[in-house]
Image (cartoon, rainbow, N blue to C red):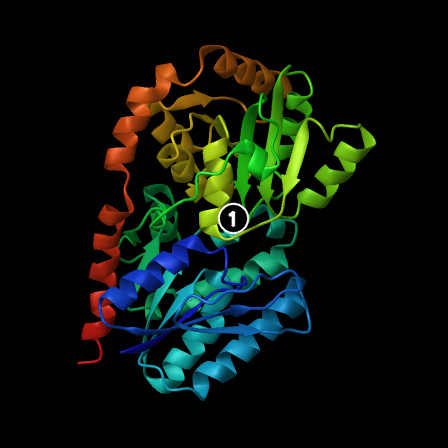
Amino acid sequence: MKIAIAVTNDLSTDQRVQRTVAVAQSLGMEVTFIGRHLPNSVPFNPGYSTLRFRLWFKKGALFYANYNLRLFWHLLFTKYDGYIANDLDTLLAVGLASRLKGKSFIYDSHEFFTGVPEIQHSSFIKGVWGWIEKRFYHRALARVTVNASIALLLQEAYGGNTPYIVRNIGMRPASVSLRSRAELGLPENAFIFINQGAGINVERGMEEAVEAIQGVDGAVLLIVGNGDAVPSLKRYVDKNNLKEKVIFIPKMPYAELLSYTQAADVGLSLDKPTSLNYMYSLPNKLFDYIHSGLPVLGSQVVEVKRIIEEYQVGKVVDSSRVSEIQSAMEEIMQVGKTPYQGGLDKAKSELTWESEAEVLKEVLNQLINSQK
């Protein structure tokens, strides 16, 4: 069975969808992974078919229109037996191609897209996205999302069966290079708090974390990845002479990223509950921290708080309060990893990609059976 799996990113750092590709291949599917090429895209040669569109626009409504048009024409004139639309921003093209060609598709919603803060300022934009999701949501053969909270939001919004839940738990690479801090260019004697990911955006607590780290002696903040908030964070660091306290590293392949994760002491997940999407988010970095043996300093968003408290793997703070973040940083520095080790060990054994993959196999087998 030949399938197309669509995203709007540049493929190389999308760990969730790369895991989906791996499961699809294990079931005998021939995959084409489709995204876009950006000026800073790194080489990506995973050993299976990929397609990265070079688009005229990089963001906003024109980007989404440009991408979906290119994707639609490709799907329309290329032979595939089925499709997977990842997130609402690929659903229009996939839904239309599926309908015109009589092929089944799966809708994998990684977030409650109509609840993202970037579109809350415009009822028109929010309405357009909502219209697209409502139109094609039930046309999907199966629907998947990342946690129980978002599954419930989708069910309340559109009805139907509860979506399948496949959490963002990383599929660890066959080997992760254990590089020293010196090799990574990191301070060897500092206590390192790390925040990583491709979604370092506004309202995700990094502005407060940068302020908090200024008052924590002996500690640095390592920000690895990219996002809307990074340029303003860099300007703030330059303006306040904080280059020795805040280190920026650009996005990189997953196996290389984990070298930095393992070199840190504590992981940060400080999304603010300022939108429905952030309130119920469950970022994959949380699981990367746990599987790298790092305690987590997290915010009060529902799913992150649930895991931190259930497994006792860190501390929960009000991520809008700089003083509270600073106090928690100092407390974790003082007590070290020991109080959290038992919880981390239990979480590592129970929160595994292998268990999530079984759910995904069930979903993908529906796509296979739909062609028989």
Residue type, numbered disc 1: Gly
Left or right: where does residue 60 sit relative to residue 350?
right
User: Residue 144: in sight, yes or no?
Assistant: yes
User: Residue 283: in sight, yes or no?
Assistant: no
Q: SS class of the residue under badge 1? A: helix
Q: Residue furthest bottom?
A: 77
Q: As rendered, which of 72 and 119 lies closer to the eye? A: 72
Badge 1: few (under 14), some or many (20 or more) residues near its Cα, within 10 Å? some
> Where's residue 135, x and y in %?
43, 69
Q: Residue at x 37, y 33 (%)?
A: 290
> Where's residue 152, x and y in %?
34, 46
- Give the image quarter of residue 249: top right
Quarter of the image with the C terminus is bottom left
Quarter of the image with the N terminus is bottom left
Q: Residue at x 44, y 78 (%)?
A: 96
Q: Residue at x 36, y 50 (%)?
A: 173
> Where's residue 182, x and y in %?
58, 33
The residue carrying mark 1 is 115
Q: Residue at x 33, y 46 (%)?
A: 167
Residue 301 higher or lower than 219, as above or below: below
Residue 26 higher or lower than 95, as above or below: above
> Where's residue 285, x and y in %?
45, 40
Q: As rendered, which of 90 and 343 lies closer to the eye? A: 343
